Image (spheres, grey):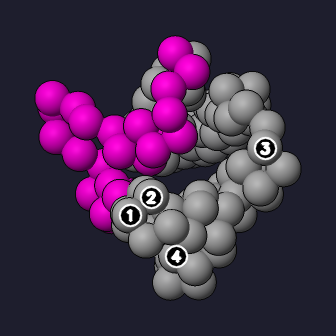
């Protein structure tokens, strides 16, 4: 999922301890992150150019965010920034959680595929014996 790549990119940028705006304005060569880019840039614009600050800008933008997982991520990030913590550790924890969730999801898909393969094999063997 694109969100995993986005959070990984945000984490990688945060390890250099840049200005917070840089974490929200991710420039990449291979294209963008679609709607995620648009939302993050809007947060950066509201926070810096309009003087909202990042925590308030996130609270404003999150109301219009449809993706529940991304919305929850932004809410947690906003609270972290509100108390003035460094986002590096938070982004690493979020990245690891998303990777774990993805691994579990794909593990379930592999197990379901194995089950279907077993059913197909048994049905094919039964058909061969019947003929």
Q: Secondary structure at mark 3?
A: loop
Say whether residue 26 is left or right of residue 1: left
Q: Residues within 10 Å of mark 3 (few under 14, many from 20)?
A: few
- The image quadrant where one finds the C terminus is top left
Q: Are marks 1 and 4 in contact (CB under 8 Å)?
A: no
* Magenta span: 16-41
Say whether residue 31 is left or right of residue 61: left
Q: CA distance from mark 3 to mark 4?
A: 19 Å
- The image quadrant where one finds the N terminus is top left
Q: Which residue is mark 3?
A: 84
Can residue 59 be seen from the camera position used here? yes
Q: Are marks 4 and 2 in contact (CB under 8 Å)?
A: no
Q: Secondary structure at mark 2?
A: helix
Q: Which residue is mark 1?
A: 49
Could you tell me residue 25's position as x and y percent? 35, 45
Q: CA distance from mark 1 to mark 4?
A: 15 Å
Q: Which residue is mark 2?
A: 48
Could you tell me residue 79's position as x and y percent? 79, 57
Can residue 118 be seen from the camera position used here? no
Q: Which mark is residue 61?
A: 4
Q: Mark 1 or mark 3: which comes first in sequence?
A: 1
**Comparing marks 4 and 2, which lies closer to the viewer?**
2
Q: Which mark is residue 22?
A: none
Q: CA distance from mark 1 to mark 3?
A: 20 Å
Q: Mark 1 or mark 4: which comes first in sequence?
A: 1
| Above or below for 81 versus 121 | below
**Comparing marks 1 and 4, which lies closer to the viewer?**
1
Q: CA distance from mark 4 to mark 2?
A: 14 Å
Say whether residue 45 is left or right of residue 31: right
């Amino acid at each position: 999922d694109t969100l995993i790549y986005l959070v990984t990119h945000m984490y990688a940028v945060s390890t250099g301890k840049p200005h917070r705006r840089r974490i929200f304005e991710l420039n990449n060569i291979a294209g963008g992150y679609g709607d995620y880019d648009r939302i993050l840039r809007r947060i950066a614009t509201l926070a810096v150019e309009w003087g909202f600050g990042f925590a308030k800008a996130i609270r404003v933008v999150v109301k219009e965010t449809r993706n529940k997982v991304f919305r929850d991520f932004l809410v947690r990030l906003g609270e972290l920034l509100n108390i003035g913590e460094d986002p590096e550790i938070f982004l690493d924890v979020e990245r690891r959680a998303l990777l774990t969730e993805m691994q579990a999801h794909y593990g379930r898909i592999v197990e379901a595929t194995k089950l279907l393969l077993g059913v197909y094999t048994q049905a094919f063997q039964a058909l061969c014996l019947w003929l």
